[in-house]
Amino acid sequence: MNLHSTAAQLVTLAAEGEEHGGNHHSLNPYLTGIGAFAVLMLLLFITTRFNRDR
């Protein structure tokens, strides 16, 4: 299997996946973004509370 045939197979596989839209129906982008933001803010809060070097 060479690079050209591998690339051709990957392009074919990617083209077949476009038929379904690519996103799962149960994933809400706003809820996912808000959840990720909340987790990052929680990690920032924990980091600043335990970093008492200053």
Image (cartoon, rainbow, N blue to C red):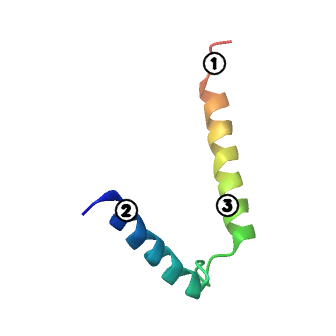
Residue 24 placement (x, y as % from top left): 58, 80
- Relative to the observer, which residue lies in front, 26 or 9? 9
Taking the spot 70% from the left edge, 53% from the top edge, the residue there is 38
- Relative to the observer, which residue lies in front, 43 or 28? 28
- Tell me the residue that label 1 is attached to: 52
Helix, strand or loop for disc 1: loop
Which comes before the other along the chain, label 3 or label 2?
Answer: 2
Taking the spot 49% from the left edge, 83% from the top edge, the residue there is 16
Q: CA distance from mark 2 to mark 1?
A: 56 Å
Q: CA distance from mark 3 to mark 1?
A: 27 Å
Helix, strand or loop for disc 2: helix
Residue 21 placement (x, y as % from top left): 61, 83
- Quadrant where the N terminus sits is bottom left
Check if mark 3's residue and mark 1's residue have beta carbons within 8 Å: no
Circle 1: is it few (<14), some (14-19), or many (20+) Cα within 10 Å? few
Which quadrant of the structure image shows residue 27?
A: bottom right
- Relative to the observer, which residue lies in front, 8 or 51? 8
38 above or below 8? Answer: above
Q: Amino acid at mark 3?
A: Gly
Q: CA distance from mark 3 to mark 2?
A: 41 Å
Helix, strand or loop for disc 3: helix
Check if mark 3's residue and mark 2's residue have beta carbons within 8 Å: no
Q: Amino acid at mark 2?
A: His
Residue 25 located left or right of residue 33 = left
28 above or below 32? Answer: below
Which comes before the other along the chain, label 2 or label 1?
Answer: 2
- Tell me the residue that label 3 is attached to: 35
- Tell me the residue that label 2 is attached to: 4
Taking the spot 38% from the left edge, 72% from the top edge, the residue there is 9
Please identify the residue farthest to the top as the structure is shown. 54
Residue 50 placement (x, y as % from top left): 59, 27
Which comes before the other along the chain, label 3 or label 1?
Answer: 3
